[in-house]
Image (cartoon, rainbow, N blue to C red):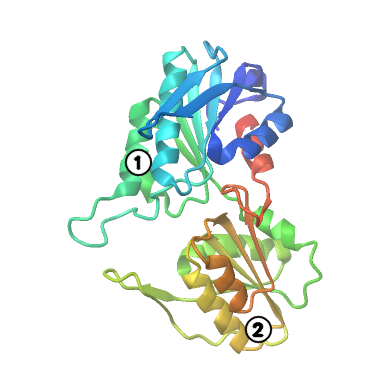
C-alpha cells in the first residue's frame, strides 16, 4: 500500500470512536501504536462535540470508525474526527472504515435516485483524507472517479479459518446470491470444498426478495452460508430454508458485516441455522472474528 512501510510505523497514531473502539485497541496492540485520547459529548439538541486531547501534529493519523446504524451519526463523527486531526497539523490521515454505510446504493436503480454511496465517498475526499481502507465493501464501484486511494480488504479468508476448527462433514459453501460469490469462493478455497450460489431478484419498488429455486446437492452435508452483509436476514433465510429442505445435515451462517436489524437473529435460527458468526466490523454478540490482524497487516505492509 502506497505510503505505508515498517519504517514509518513510529510516526503513526490511532484515533477511534464509538463504533470501533475495541477493534482499534486490538489494532493498537498488534502494531504497538499510540491511541489518541478524544473527548466526545452531545449537546442537548443532539449536536456532537469533538476535542482531541493529545497532539497529532506531524503524525500519520489512522482514524478507525465503522458506520453501522445509526449510520448518519457515525458518519458525522468520522467527518469531524478527520477534519479535527487535519486542523491540528496531522501529516496525513487514513480513514479505516470497516463497514461503510450507504455503499449498497452504488448506482441509480430507478430514475432520480441519489447514488448515496458515491456521495459519501466524495464527502470523505472533501474532508481531506489521504487514503481510505474498507473491508468487503458491497461494490467497489462507489470508488470510481475519486482522486484519493481507496483500498478494500477481503475478510472472507478469516471466516474460512474460523470454520476450519469445526468438525464439518462434507462441507459445502453456499452464497445466498451472486453478490456474495467473492466471499463464498474465498471461504471454499480455505476449506478446500465445493462452492455454489443462488440467484435472487429484488423488486426495485417494494424491496421484496425472491430467491430462485435451485437443486443443490447438500444431502447429508454441512452447509456454510456466506454473505458480505446480513441486514434484515431475508436473503439468508431463503438460502437456509432451501438448504434444509434439500437435506443439509447442518447449516452454519457467516458474514463480514453483521448488522442484524430487528429480529434478524431470530429469523435466521428459526429457519434452521445451527450457528451464526460475523466479524467485529460491526460490534455484536456474534462478532467473534476480529478484523484487527487483517487491518494491522494492511497498515504495515
Q: Nearer the viewer, residue 47 or 85?
A: 47
> Tag 2's secondary structure?
loop
Residue 130 appears in which quarter of the rendering? top left
Within 10 Å of disc 2 (Cα), the crowding (few <14, some 14-19, many 20+) is many
Q: Nearer the viewer, residue 295 or 84?
A: 84
Q: Nearer the viewer, residue 21 or 126?
A: 21
Residue highlighted by disc 2:
218
Precedes in sequence: disc 1 or disc 2: 1
**Residue in view at x 34 percent, y 53 percent:** 106
Residue 46 appears in which quarter of the rendering? top left
Total numbered labels placed on residues in the image: 2
In the rendered image, residue 170, in percent from the top left (x then y), is placed at 75, 78
Seen from this angle, which residue lies furthest left?
A: 112
Q: Is residue 130 left or right of residue 220?
A: left
Q: How far is the residue under mark 1 from the one under mark 2?
A: 41 Å
Q: Which mark is residue 258?
A: none
Is residue 268 visible in this depiction of the protein? yes
Q: Is residue 168 left or right of residue 296?
A: right
Residue 194 appears in which quarter of the rendering? bottom right
In the rendered image, residue 34, in percent from the top left (x then y), is placed at 66, 21
**Residue in view at x 61 percent, y 88 percent:** 246
Within 10 Å of disc 1 (Cα), the crowding (few <14, some 14-19, many 20+) is some
Q: Nearer the viewer, mark 1 or mark 2?
A: 1
Residue highlighted by disc 1:
120
Q: Is residue 295 left or right of residue 39?
A: right
Amino acid at each position: 500500500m502506497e505510503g505505508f512501510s515498517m519504517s514509518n510505523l513510529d510516526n503513526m497514531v490511532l484515533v477511534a470512536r464509538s463504533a470501533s473502539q475495541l477493534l482499534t485497541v486490538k489494532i493498537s496492540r498488534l502494531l504497538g501504536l499510540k491511541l489518541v485520547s478524544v473527548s466526545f459529548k452531545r449537546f442537548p439538541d443532539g449536536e456532537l462535540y469533538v476535542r482531541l486531547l493529545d497532539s497529532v501534529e506531524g503524525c500519520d493519523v489512522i482514524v478507525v470508525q465503522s458506520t453501522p446504524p445509526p449510520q448518519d451519526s457515525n458518519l458525522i463523527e468520522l467527518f469531524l474526527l478527520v477534519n479535527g486531526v487535519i486542523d491540528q497539523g496531522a501529516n496525513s490521515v487514513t480513514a479505516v472504515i470497516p463497514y461503510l454505510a450507504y455503499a449498497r446504493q452504488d448506482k441509480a436503480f430507478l430514475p432520480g435516485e441519489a447514488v448515496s454511496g458515491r456521495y459519501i465517498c466524495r464527502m470523505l475526499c472533501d474532508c481531506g483524507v489521504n487514503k481510505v481502507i474498507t473491508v468487503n465493501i458491497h461494490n467497489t464501484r462507489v470508488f470510481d472517479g475519486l482522486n484519493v486511494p481507496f483500498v478494500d480488504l477481503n475478510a472472507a479468508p478469516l471466516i474460512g479459518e474460523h470454520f476450519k476448527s469445526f468438525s464439518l462433514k462434507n462441507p459445502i459453501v453456499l452464497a445466498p446470491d451472486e453478490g456474495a460469490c467473492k466471499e463464498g469462493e474465498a471461504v471454499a478455497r480455505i476449506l478446500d470444498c465445493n462452492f455454489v450460489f443462488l440467484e435472487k431478484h429484488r423488486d426495485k419498488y417494494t424491496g421484496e426478495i425472491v430467491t430462485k429455486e435451485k437443486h443443490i446437492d447438500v444431502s447429508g452435508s454441512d452447509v456454510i452460508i456466506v454473505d458480505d452483509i446480513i441486514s434484515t436476514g431475508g436473503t439468508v433465510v431463503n438460502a437456509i430454508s432451501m438448504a434444509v429442505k434439500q437435506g443439509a445435515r447442518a447449516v452454519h451462517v457467516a458474514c463480514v458485516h453483521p448488522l442484524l436489524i430487528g429480529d434478524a437473529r431470530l429469523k435466521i435460527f428459526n429457519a434452521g441455522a445451527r450457528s451464526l458468526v460475523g466479524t467485529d466490523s460491526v460490534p455484536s454478540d456474534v462478532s467473534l472474528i476480529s478484523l484487527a490482524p487483517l487491518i494491522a497487516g494492511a497498515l504495515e505492509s
